[in-house]
Image (cartoon, rainbow, N blue to C red):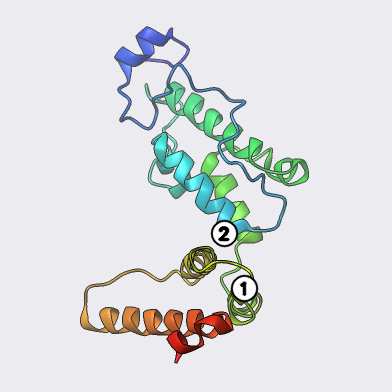
């Protein structure tokens, strides 16, 4: 059933667990993330948008697990509408100049791949930048301990995403995670205010 049907027909034709489903409340003018991507902070933007798309069951459009059906397929119309909706959401989350650079790509998957190729830094440069600017020289300063720890934890999470570290229950995986935890503890202690000198010792 085509998504051009009325809201009630659409709900009957496709259930909400189907990635092709478009809820009556969905709108192409939605901005799914609070931080519009302007070329800086791609990792955080990507994470925010991925979370938003997952709540709408649309991740399959960007990860390639939902291929485009043939034009003759009965699912094509629904796929086309859902694909267009997700494209609108992504474009709305991009700065105008970046959005214009991917505007004429036909599928959500194509846009996602292009953005990743242009802006995702998987080399050591970004890791170095995070380690140096956000961790090595970061100190507690006037922050209370909870605020200081929260800021550090956010940087650690960002670094884990950039390094593509996945959890593993194997012996080596457990040892690696233990090493990372030890490094984080040392980083945290190094940045503590002098008031915590005894604790740090």
Within 10 Å of disc 1 (Cα), the crowding (few <14, some 14-19, many 20+) is some
CA–CA distance in space, label 2 to label 1 = 15 Å
Q: Which mark is residue 62?
A: none
Is 25 left or right of 66, judged from the image as shown? right
Percent position of residue 94, x then y: 67, 43
Q: Quadrant of residue 43?
A: bottom right
Q: Residue furthest left?
A: 170
Residue tagged 1 = 134
Mark 2: few/some/many CA within 10 Å (<14, 14-19, 20+)? some
The answer, for residue 193, to whether it is visible in the render is yes
Quarter holding the C terminus is bottom left
Task: Name the residue beneath numbered marker 2.
Answer: 43
What is the secondary structure assignment of the residue under circle 1?
Answer: helix
In this rendering, is residue 140 above or below 47?
Answer: below
Residue at figure coordinates x 59%, y 39% from the top left: 90
Locate the N terminus and report the quarter of the image it occupies.
top left
Depicted 68 relative to depicted 123: above or below: above
């Amino acid at each position: 059933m085509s998504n051009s049907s009325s809201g009630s027909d659409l709900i009957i034709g496709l259930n909400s667990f189907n990635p092709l489903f478009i809820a009556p409340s969905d709108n192409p003018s939605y901005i799914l993330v609070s931080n519009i991507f302007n070329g800086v902070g791609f990792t955080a933007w990507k994470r925010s948008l991925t979370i938003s798309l997952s709540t709408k069951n649309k991740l399959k459009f960007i990860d390639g697990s939902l291929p485009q059906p043939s034009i003759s397929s009965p699912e094509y119309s629904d796929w086309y509408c859902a694909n267009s909706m997700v494209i609108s959401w992504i474009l709305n989350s991009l700065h105008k100049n970046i959005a214009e650079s991917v505007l004429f790509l036909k599928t959500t998957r194509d846009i996602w791949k292009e953005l990743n190729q242009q802006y995702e830094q998987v080399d050591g440069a970004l890791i170095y930048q995070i380690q140096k600017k956000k961790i090595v020289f970061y100190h507690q300063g006037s922050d209370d301990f909870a605020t200081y720890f929260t800021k550090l934890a956010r940087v650690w999470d960002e670094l884990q995403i950039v390094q593509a570290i996945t959890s593993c229950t194997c012996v080596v995986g457990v040892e690696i995670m233990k090493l990372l935890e030890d490094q984080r503890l040392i980083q945290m202690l190094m940045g503590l205010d002098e008031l915590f000198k005894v604790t740090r010792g």
